[in-house]
Amino acid sequence: MQLYKNQHIKVYNSLTGKKEPFETITEGNVGMYVCGPTVYSNVHLGNVRTFMSFDMVFRYLKHLGYKVRYVRNITDAGHLENDADAGEDKITKKARLEEIEPMEIVQRYTVDFHNVLNQFNFLPPSIEPTATGHIIEQIELISTIIDNGFGYEVNGSVYFDVHKYNETNNYGILSKRKLEDLIHNTRALDGQSDKKNPQDFALWKKAEPTHIMRWPSPWSDGFPGWHLECTAMSTKYLGEQFDIHGGGMDLKFPHHECEIAQNQAAKGKSPVNYWMHANMLELNGSRMSKSTGNYINPAELLSGKNDILSKAYNPNVVRFFMMQSAYRSVLDLTDNGLLASEKGFNRLMNAVDDLDNLKTLNASSFDVKAWKQTCYDAMNDDFNTPILIANLFEAVNHINAVKEGSKTISSEDLEVFKSALHTFVFELLGLNNAKDSAEGTEKLSGAVELLIKLRQEARANKDFALSDQIRDELAEVGITLNDSREGTTFSTN
Ligand code: AMP
Ligand code: ZN
């Protein structure tokens, strides 16, 4: 029998502001959509935190036996500066500054995104669609929204009529905003805009002659509005109504609010049953963000090359640090916090290793099955990973007590204990035993040292072509050789 029949999850639903029993639309299946990155720059650790929260949710749902279709998109067009309806496309701007094609920017930062997620041991989503791959679907959606009376065209651009929509629907249902307050708080249009009202948002924008990323449409050569892609891609792969939609807290308004409005206007349905929002990673007491410059990149954390860090951190320690806080809580990134997580992580891994050498007796002096259920209870309570980790440290105490002889465990219970710990630590929290990666590092060092030796021999034989080849090809795979009087060392980046 599938675990989800016994383990009943409650999910905090941003739409209702309550923790609700999780019931899927189709028994045994979950459709989950998460807004992916806009690939115009390297992801920062804040982005990583949000994606990691949903990686953990994905892992747990799969573990419970659900068949999960997890869709996480790549935004490669349509996202304008300041998340606005006018201004330059973020990707085009970067391409202009670097004098390369926008699609080169997209490719570079998509690769970077995947590399980062691999370093942190993410599971790949089931589908990773791109905005530019779904222009036809977006144009179709706009046509339907216009036909249904909720969109209007002006000078080749199409806007969503928020006021008209709000007459029969509730614009603000997710973000708990009221249209009257929005009207009160926005500046009047300056006459430059084609919009009827400042609250309206773009579904299609006519491209300026210099705008490179453009597609033909019934209205103009242009590009889709940012909110539209997620409506098009989520409903294409998950249906007009699906189970979970996730993203960072900052996307609730306007992005997710507009997604609801678009779907409601096009299909007459609210698209999502459970809206889940992950909270922000902070640095120096305020939100990590690319635009304010208050951020750390994953590479800095893994190399220790940042002034706030006393050392380099293993990606597993970073993952453990993030999992020690609930996904709905704000988390502040500090060196002390990371050091504490490193200690805790090592303690946990040592205990997991010790499991293989525990002596068993006929009876256990603690209830392993009850402990296991407390771990499930934590995860069932809106994916409460900090409580799960507190329970894992209970297990560490048990393991140490059995080692010291003050507690006992039967061989049958030891098997349950081992398998549960492996499940929670590796499968659900997504950690790897860092000792394994330390072993990998050791092997790499051995291989590079050998190449350094061969290069020295080549130099001694005046075979500079070979010595340069060794240096250059190592550089290509990210290993830099540093020559000095004392000899040659290497660094990885
Ligand atoms: P973007 O590429 O800017 O669209 O962001 C990708 C994802 O990262 C979105 O779900 C954002 O909500 C999320 N995000 C951005 N900044 C932070 C932060 N400081 N902490 C957590 N998540 C963030
Ligand atoms: Zn989105």
Image (spheres, helix red, strand yellow):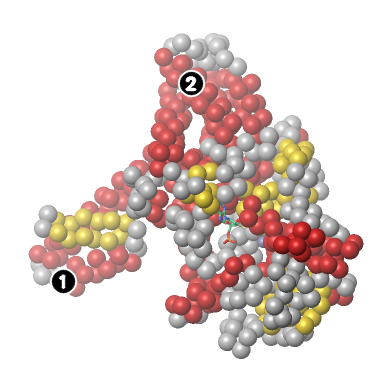
- Amino acid type of the residue that numbered disc 1 sits on in the rendered structure: Phe
Q: Residue at horizontal 43%, vertical 40%?
A: 338
Q: Nearer the viewer, residue 122 or 311?
A: 311
Tell which of 183 and 374 is nearer to you: 183
Frontmost residue, 402 versus 336: 336
Q: Quadrant of residue 87?
A: bottom right
Residue at horizontal 72 percent and vertical 62 percent from the top? 185
Q: Quadrant of the N terminus?
A: top right
Asked if ligand 1 lies within 8 A of label 2, the reply is no
Q: Residues within 10 Å of mark 2 (few under 14, many from 20)?
A: some
Residue 464: mark: 1
Q: Position of residue 106 (x, y in %)?
A: 53, 71
The disc, 2 or 1, on the residue closer to the chain's N-terminal end is: 2
Image location (x, y in percent) of residue 98: 44, 77
Quadrant holding the C terminus: bottom left
Rendered location of residue 382, percent (x, y): 68, 38
